[in-house]
Amino acid sequence: MAVLNIIEIKNLSKKFDDHVVLNNVSLDVEAGENLVVFGRSGSGKSVLLKCTIGLLSPDEGKIFIKGKNILSLTKKELNKIRKHIGFLFQSAALYDSMSVRDNLAFPLIKQKLIPADKIEDKIHNTLAMVSLEEAIDKMPSELSGGMRKRIGLARAIITDPEIMFYDEPTTGLDPISSKEISELIITLQKKLNMTSIVVTHDLICAKIIADRAIFLRNAKVAYEGTLEELVKSNDPFLKNFFSTELINT
Ligand SMILES: Nc1ncnc2c1ncn2[C@@H]1O[C@H](COP(=O)(O)OP(=O)(O)O)[C@@H](O)[C@H]1O
Ligand SMILES: [Mg+2]
C-alpha cells in the first residue's frame, strides 16, 4: 500500500518585514507518524505550526492536509478540515471560570459534533483516557500544573482529531510530570491512531514521542532523522544543542 502523507508542506516561506523566519521549508508527515520539531528559541517552530493550521498566512508555498491545499480552500472547506485537527498550545489555557466539565463540553458544543444528550458520556470517556474522571466538577484553580495539562490534552482530543499539533506541551512542568504527560501523549496518539507534529526542546519528551525529528535552523530544515541519529551526530551545532539540553533537563 502506498504511504499516505497526511501532511505535506511544500516550499513554505514566511517573513515578518525583512526578517525571514522560514525559507523554502518542505516537510512530509506520514499517517500515524509523530514528528518532533526542534530548534532554538525564535527559530520559527511556532510560526511553522501556525502556518500549517492556517492561523498565519505564509508568503509562499503550499500546505496539503489530507490531500487538500489548505491555502486555496474557502472558509467553509477550511473549517471542515479543521474538524480533523486538534491543538495543544502552551497558551491554550483552560477557561478559569468554567469547571472541567464545561471546559471539555466547549469544543463539542462549538463544533456541533455530537448530539447534546451524548456530551456527558463523551466527557466521561475522554476524562477516563487521561485518568482524571474524578476532576469533572473541579475548577482549573483546584488542579495541579500536571493535571491542568492533562485536562488540556483531554479538551484537545475530545473532538476525535486525526492530526494533533503540540507546541511545547511540557513547558513549565517538572521532569516527572513532563515524562508523565509525554507518555500519556504517545499512548493516546497510538490508541486513537493520530498523526502529530510536536514542537519541543524537551529531550525527555522527544525521546518518548518522536518517530522522527527535524531541526529548524537559519530558516531551513537543517537536520532530519531519527532522534538517535540527531543526538549522536558529530555535527558541532547539534552536539552543542543536545549537550546543553541534557544539562538543562
Ligand atoms: N506575528 C508575528 N509578527 C512579527 N514577528 C513574529 C510574529 N510571530 C513570530 N515572529 C517572529 O518570528 C520568529 C520565530 O518565532 P517563533 O516561531 O515563535 O519561534 P519559536 O521557534 O521559538 O517558536 C521570532 O523572531 C519571532 O519574533
Ligand atoms: Mg514557539
Image (cartoon, rainbow, N blue to C red):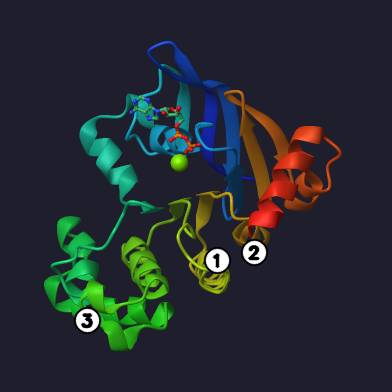
Write the residue at 58% across / 43% down.
29
Residue farthest to the right, as pictured = 234
Q: Which residue is mark 3?
A: 138
Residue at numbered disc 2: 208
Percent position of residue 211, x then y: 67, 54
Please state if 198 lies on the left or on the right of 144 as rendered: right
Image coords of residue 198 (percent x, y) = 53, 50
Q: Amino acid at mark 3?
A: Lys
| First along the sequence among labels 3 and 2 | 3
In the rendered image, the quadrant that contains the C terminus is bottom right
Ranked by sequence position, the earlier of labels 3 and 1 is 3
Q: Which mark is residue 182?
A: 1
Is tag 2's residue or tag 1's residue first in the polypeptide sequence? 1
Query: Spatial distance from mark 2 to mark 1, Cα to Cα?
Result: 6 Å
> Dot 3 surroundings within 10 Å: few (below 14), some, or many (20 or more)?
few
Q: Nearer the viewer, residue 212 or 244?
A: 244
Q: Amino acid at mark 2?
A: Ile
| Mark 3 → mark 2, Cα distance in angstroms | 30 Å
Residue lying at 59% horizontally and 33% vertically, measured from the top left: 27
In the picture shown, does residue 153 fall above or below 99?
above
Q: Quadrant of residue 15?
A: top left
Asked if one can make out residue 5 in the rendered structure from this viewpoint, the answer is yes
Compared to residue 154, the image places residue 18 above or below, namely above
Tell me the kind of residue under disc 1.
Answer: Ser
Q: Which residue is found at the position 34% from the left and 79% from the top?
A: 127
Circles 3 and 1 in contact, beta carbons < 8 Å: no
Q: Quadrant of residue 126?
A: bottom left
